[in-house]
Amino acid sequence: MSNDPRPESSATPTPLDHTPPPSAPSYTARLTAEALGTFLLVFGSLGAALFAAGFGAGTEDGIFAVGFLGVALAFGLTLMAGIYAWGPISGGHFNPAVTLGLAAAGRFPWRDTGGYLIAQIVGGAVGTTLLVLIGLFGPGNWLQQAQAGGFASNGFGEHSPGGFGLGAAIVAEILFTAIFVLVILGVTHSKRGTPAMAGLVIGLTLTFIHLASIPITNTSVNPARSIAAAIYGGPDALIQLWVFIVFPIVGGLLAGLINNALFDRKGS
C-alpha cells in the first residue's frame, strides 16, 4: 500500500516524490528514465569539465574556457533538464545518494532501490564511455592527457584541485550531499513543497554545491558520477573511489533520517 498522501487517482508522479501510482509508467520505464537522466548529467557536466573548463589555456583562445563557474552550471543545468524531461517518469533521482536518502525518509520503497542504483551506474558509465569515444578523435594525445589528469575524477590529497586531504573530503561529501538531499526532500514535499519548481531549485542547489566544493574534491555528491569518471581516470582515481561512494551515501541517508526527525515526525 502506497504511503503517498495524494489521491490515488493522480497518475503523474512528482519528480523526486513518492512511489508512482499503479497507472504510472512501468518499473522498466522508470529504470530507463533513471539511466537516461544519469547519462545526461554525466555526459553533459563531465563533458564541460573535460572539453571546456580549460579550453585554450595559455593561448589567446583561453578566453573561451568556462572554468569552475561553467562546470558548476553544467552540472546544475543538466540535472535540471533531466528532472523536467524524465522526472515525471522515474522521479528524477539520477544519483544513488538521492535514491537511498529518499528511501531513508520513507519517500521511496527500499525494494526498488537496487534497480535504480544499477540503472544510474550504467547510465553514468555510458556517459563517460561516449566522452572517451569523442576523445579518440581528438587532437594529438588529448585523450591520453585527459586520462592522465584523472578524467575529471574526484580525489583528495594530491588529487584534490586545492590539495585538501582525506578528512576534508569525508566531511565535505557528507555535508554537501546531506544539504542536497534535504533541499530535495523539502522542495518535493507533497504538502509543503513546490514540485513545479523542483527542477529549477534542485539544479541551482547542485550548482552552488559545485561552486563551493570543486576545489575540495572536484565534487562528487553522486556515486554514479564518481564511478563513471573513475572507470577512465586511472589507478589513483579507482583507489580513492571508495570515499566518493561511501560518504555521499552516508550524507544522503543522514539527510533522510534528519528530515524525518525534524519535519516529518508521525503525528506532527
Image (tube, rainbow, N blue to C red):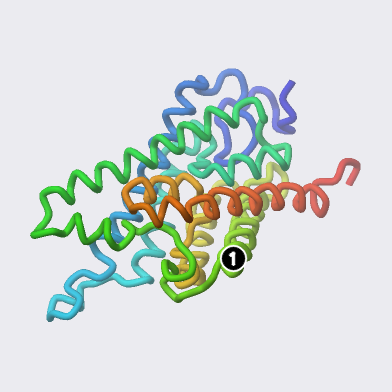
Quick one: quadrant of the N terminus?
A: top right
222 in relation to 72, above or below: above
Left or right relative to 160: residue 102? right
Q: Percent from the top left, x then y, of residue 67? A: 32, 72
Q: Position of residue 110 (x, y in %)?
A: 67, 30
Residue 179 placement, left or right of 130: right
Horizontal arrangement in the rendering, residue 155 relative to residue 186 (left or right): left
Count of numbered labels shown in the rendering:
1
Residue for point 58% across, 46% down = 97
Helix, strand or loop at mark 1? helix
Front-most of 167 and 53? Answer: 167
Displayed quadrant of residue 56: bottom left
Q: Is residue 100 left or right of residue 61?
A: right
Q: Nearer the viewer, residue 153 or 264?
A: 153
**Furthest residue toward right:** 267
Image vertical order of residue 133 relative to residue 220, above or below: above
User: In terms of image quadrants, where is residue 160?
Assistant: bottom left
Q: Amino acid at mark 1?
A: Ala
Q: Residue at the spot x=65%, y=44% of the render?
A: 101
- In depth, the one of 92 and 143 nearer the eye is 143
The picture places residue 194, in percent across and down from the top left corner, at 62, 50
Quick check: 139 above or below 160? above
Q: Nearer the viewer, residue 229 or 11?
A: 229
The residue lying at 66 percent from left, 54 percent from top is: 182
Q: Which residue position is annotated with label 1?
A: 172
Q: Residues within 10 Å of mark 1 (few under 14, many from 20)?
A: many
Q: Position of residue 186 (x, y in %)?
A: 67, 52
